[in-house]
Image (cartoon, rainbow, N blue to C red):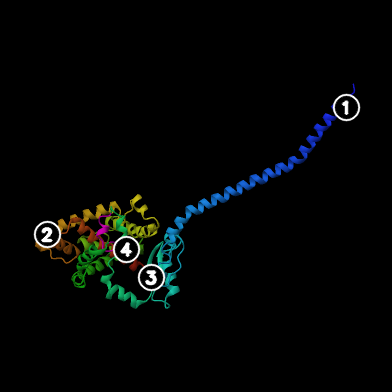
Amino acid sequence: METSSPDRRRRWMRSERQSRVDQYRPRVRGASNYADRGNMYILVTLGLIVVHLLLLPLYVYLTWHHRFWRKRGLVTARPLTMLGTYPGLLTRTSNLVEDVQKVYDKYKGKHRAVGVFVTRQPQILVLDPELAHEILVVNFRCYKDSLTSSYMRHARWDKYARRNPFWASGQSWRSLRTDAQAGISGHRLKQGYAIWEEGGRMLTSYMTDRIKAPHNLLETRDLCFRYTAHVMADFIWGIDAGTLSRPQEHPNKVQQMASKWTSHAFYMISVFMASIVAPFSRLLLRLRFYPKETDEFFSRLTKESIDMRLSAGNDNTRTDYLSHLLQLREQKQASHDDLVGHALTVMLDGYDTTGTALLHALYYVAG
């Protein structure tokens, strides 16, 4: 049966329309892809704008003080945005001393001082010895506050650290420094010379016994800190710590606590310096300079040492730091916490520093 002419025409028209649709479909699909890609670019651009707007306040906060010294006419060591002049504080890739040395070597002989930044906190690095003498000796009374004294606002749980002049400020700094220095004056140290002399004899005896013993190995670091622990405990608390007289006690409690305490305190100084970027984190993390365990140990040690000294009566005329602490208690009504704070001030100044100096001295002598 033949198809009528109108039917053929309709089929032809349908096929023609379909071919045209098929012809333009790739173009439409391509246009759609271009539109999707354009929308993606718009979203990425908007996202980057939002990120920049969010980061802008942080950038302004971190760099707010970077022109501080330049405005005051002082040459400034170029700081990094978040790391400041001493990047090792945050990156831990270098020691603070190494970062300071780099700045010192770059500017020494050219300027008397240079502006630096501990993260975002402006500080001055003194390069000229005469200027350092003027600050530390001639006009020292004018410099009663320091960067470290600001840490105490966030170390609320450190009752003994806040009694150390190193972290104190204002009138409290003056009072604590006066009380602490009176116990280690030149005259008083001369009177306590017998303590250092006896410590030297005990060190010699300890080394002789160790050399005669089987497996006669003397570990230099342990030797230096045994001696330092003995001398500091004898001078501050008037006790024999046993580090030289009872070597079989291992680990020795006094030496163990002193090493743990000083290591933690010096480490936390760098942590507090690094946290200048976000000081509120100190409160959130409940940071403290002195561990609670060592606080309790040295508190008991101070109390027991005072009780022993008082039980000896007037027969004990020993001149050491403990006798100075008793004078503070009698004359200035110093509390127990005040006495522990003063004792730990001397311990912090003398234990790790002296032991490390002896260790390096022996290293260079051996070389």
Is residue 159 a member of the stretch shown in magenta? yes
Q: Which residue is mark 4?
A: 352
Q: Residue furthest right?
A: 2
Label 1 sits on a secondary structure element that is: helix
Residue 199 in sight: yes
Q: In this rendering, would 41 be left or right of 285?
A: right
Neighbourhood count class around disc 3 (C-alpha, 10 Å): few under 14, some 14–19, many 20 upward? some
Q: Which mark is residue 312?
A: 2
The CA span between labels 1 and 3 is 103 Å
Furthest residue to the top? 1
Q: In the picture, which quadrant includes the C terminus?
A: bottom left
Specify the quadrant of the image occupied by residue 237.
bottom left
Q: Please name the amino acid that badge 4 sits on.
A: Asp
The circle drawn on residue 5 is 1
Q: Which residues are magenta?
A: 158-167
> Mark 4 or mark 3, which is nearer the start of the sequence?
3
Magenta segment, principal secondary structure? loop
Per the image, the residue denoted by label 3 is: 125
**Numbered disc in front, either 2 or 4:** 4
The residue carrying pointer 2 sits among few (fewer than 14), some (14 to 19) or many (20 or more) residues within 10 Å by Cα, namely few
Q: Is residue 40 left or right of residue 289?
A: right
> Decide: marks 1, 3 in contact (CB < 8 A)?
no
- Gap in Å between the C-alphas at discs 4 and 1? 111 Å
Percent across and percent down for residue 186 are: 21, 72
Report helix, strand or loop for mark 4: helix
Q: Is residue 252 above or below residue 122?
A: above
Tell me the CA gap for discs 3 and 2. 50 Å
Q: Earlier in the sequence, mark 4 or mark 1?
A: 1
- Pointers 2 and 4 in contact (C-beta within 8 Å): no
